[in-house]
Image (cartoon, rainbow, N blue to C red):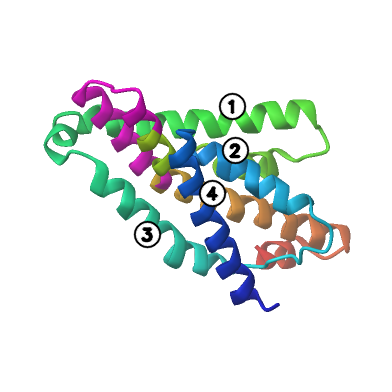
């Protein structure tokens, strides 16, 4: 199977699981995670390599659009300040906390690499948040706050991820040059 066929098969599986979740009245994100874990443990399932551009252009925008159409814009405008503070401050604090715990538990992981992991894990899934918030019947203002934060935190997470990747790879290039015995000028040029 080629990559496109594998991704198409996974989309079909995700659609079936989501429909099953509706029938069972279970949270779809939880069932999707369980299905993903089950598929990942099946022997012989080929690895799928996706370029970051495919995810950034082909996967994230439709997901964010679907979550955005579910949000009430009038309520979101009222809580935009709080949403912004949470989407930036909470995501940054979460990324730092994950980095700190990761580096503390696994000292062999550099702080820069731990921060990359923190940036990846810091944001929430807007579709899952919307589904959960809707099922809890939250008041409109709180629902707008939760949905708005989950929509905008992806932006913060992506920016943190880009910064963390550049920091992690810049340090690796510098260390690689120094270990080879090159001069400081050539080590800086590698950055």
Q: Mark 4 points at which residue?
A: 17
Which residue sits at x=53%, y=62%? Answer: 11
Q: Name the residue under label 3.
A: 61
The circle on residue 118 is 2
Q: Is residue 50 above or below residue 157?
A: below
Q: Where is residue 178 in the image (x, y as percent from the top left)?
A: 82, 58
Q: Name the residue under label 1.
A: 97
Q: Tell me the CA gap for discs 3 and 1.
A: 27 Å
Q: Which residue lies furthest to the left in this view?
A: 74
| Disc 3 + disc 1, Cβ < 8 Å | no
Discs 4/1, front: 4
Q: Tell me the CA gap for discs 3 and 2.
A: 22 Å
| Disc 3 + disc 2, Cβ < 8 Å | no
Name the quadrant containing residue 114. top right
Q: What element carries label 1?
A: helix
In which quadrant is the N terminus drawn?
bottom right
């Amino acid at each position: 199977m080629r990559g496109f066929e594998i991704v198409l098969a996974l989309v079909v599986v995700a659609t079936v699981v989501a429909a099953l979740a509706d029938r069972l009245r279970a949270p779809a994100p939880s069932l999707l995670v369980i299905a993903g874990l089950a598929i990942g443990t099946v022997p012989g399932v080929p690895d799928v390599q996706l370029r970051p551009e495919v995810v950034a252009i082909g996967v994230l925008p439709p997901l964010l659009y679907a979550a955005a159409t579910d949000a009430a814009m009038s309520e979101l405008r009222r809580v935009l300040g709080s949403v912004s503070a949470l989407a930036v401050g909470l995501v940054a604090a979460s990324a730092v906390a994950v980095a700190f715990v990761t580096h503390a538990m696994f000292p062999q992981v550099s702080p820069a690499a731990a921060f990359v992991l923190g940036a990846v894990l810091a944001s929430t899934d807007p579709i899952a948040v919307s589904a959960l918030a809707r099922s809890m019947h939250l008041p409109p203002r709180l629902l707008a706050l939760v949905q708005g934060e989950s929509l905008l935190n992806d932006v913060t997470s992506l920016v943190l991820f880009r910064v963390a990747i550049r920091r992690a790879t810049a340090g690796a290039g510098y260390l690689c040059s120094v270990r080879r015995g090159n001069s400081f000028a050539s080590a800086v040029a590698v950055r």
